Image: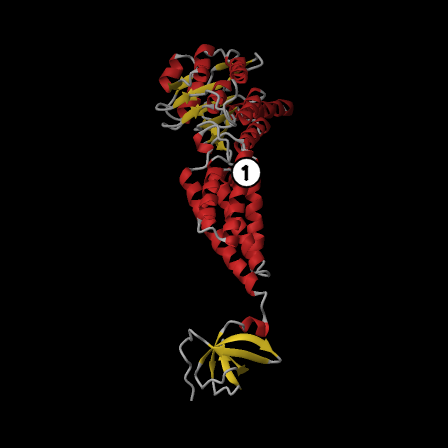
Amino acid sequence: MGRYRSELRWFAAIFIVCVLSLHVPAQQPLVDKFKLHETIQPVSQAEFEQAIARANKDGAQALLVEMDTPGGMVESMRAMVAAELGSRVPIIVYVAPSGARAGSAGFFLLEASDIAAMAPGTEAGAAHVVYEFGKPDATMQQKIENDAEAFLRSFVTRRNRNAEAATAALQNSRSYTAEEALNQHLIDLIQNNENQLLAALDGREITRFDGSKLKLHLAGARIETIRPALRDELLAWLVDPNIALLFLVGGALLIYLEFNTPGTIVPGALGTLMVLLAIFALNLLPIRYTAVMLLLAAVVLLLLEAKFGGHGVLAIAGIICLTFGMLTLVAAPIPEMAVTPWVAIAISVGFGSITVFLMRLAVRARRRKAAIGPDALVGAHATALEPLAPEGHVLVEGEIWRAVSDPPVEKGTGLRVVSYEQHLLRVVPDANPQTPLTTA
């Protein structure tokens, strides 16, 4: 009897475990999300690669990339495409929200993804090659464009998308609305928001770039947004050429202030930090060295204006060089990466005017330092405090000095200092005296 009771307990325990297991919910799938809402350059490239690495590490079912970009640099785009194609986790590129675009280099990222999707009211395309350092000769231009076209076809065809329509965006700068892109088989679907997108993809079987098949399980997925680190956010803000130039000019003025008033420390330290940050940011961008030469020439012209004076001609020439140098400093593949004209003009005029003003003050101060003590009083106006016949006291620059005059002068006479000899000032009557000093 005891044996049967023991078996009954085991049976009951197994039954309870089975019943409870039926009520244990399935593990909620995870989808990582990364927002690419900026130009494509080394900073956004690093953020994109870090997002893919995290999605591959934390067991996400997919990485959802919400894109809104005008495009950017070719080298960064190629590295980002390579990261997409090599990801173990499927990449879903979703052009959203409404009004967003996947322009230029962004079109390459869209077409390289495992799932390409767009929201209503978005666009993609206009992927024609823009030359960073001037248009090359016909042969080199053909090589560059053919290379970009072959690169695009290499993954568009593997994704079973319309290679002809894709290359039209490259050859003729063709742009497509979401509906046109879907009809041309450039994207896989159109959805209003990310939740509807994941619901529509649940259960869909996709072909990865390596040819393997994968069924997506995205129903009720938990979306976790990947936020860039503070360092990346700072770099993304600083890589704007307008901000970088403001840091460069502001830092240069602070360093000059430190040299002009040594010992203040704070302006020099802050200025050095700003200049280094600006140089670091500009180093991430394509820089024209002819523009750098214009900036150096502008500084030389401004210094010459301050030292020798050119009735403003040298200063104007320097400001013009500074403006053109700033406008052409960044060889921007898209307008969003170029220096804004009003920023360049404002910085050039402000920096040029401040530089000339400060340098003139410095030059005058240096010239005045050549005469110190009594020698500095030569040529100054003086007033006789008593009759000088020929010796007496005079007031010069707020100080009382012994002076000798030839010829003798009366009290209150306006005088001018002509020399300093044996602790005495030699003065003469001033042909254009200042207002005489009245004394008791």
From the image, which quarter does the C terminus lie in? bottom left
Q: Secondary structure at mark 1?
A: helix
Q: Which one is in front, 113 or 424?
A: 424
Residue lying at the far bottom in this picture: please name it: 440
Looking at this view, is 213 or 47 the one in front?
Answer: 47
Visible residue check, residue 24? no
Indicate the position of residue 298 as horizontal and vertical percent values: 51, 43
Quarter of the image for the N terminus: give it.
top right
Q: Is 231 situated above or below 134?
A: below
> In this image, 76 relative to 197: left or right?
right
> Looking at the image, which residue is at 57% across and 36% down?
283
Crowd around label 1: few <14 · some 14–19 · many ≥20 (10 Å):
some
Question: Can residue 93 be seen here?
Answer: yes
Residue 81 percent across, percent down from the top left: 54, 22
What x and y, as percent, mark residue 219? 45, 23
Residue type marked 1? Val
Identified at 56% across, 25% down, the residue is 75
Residue corresponding to mark 1:
292
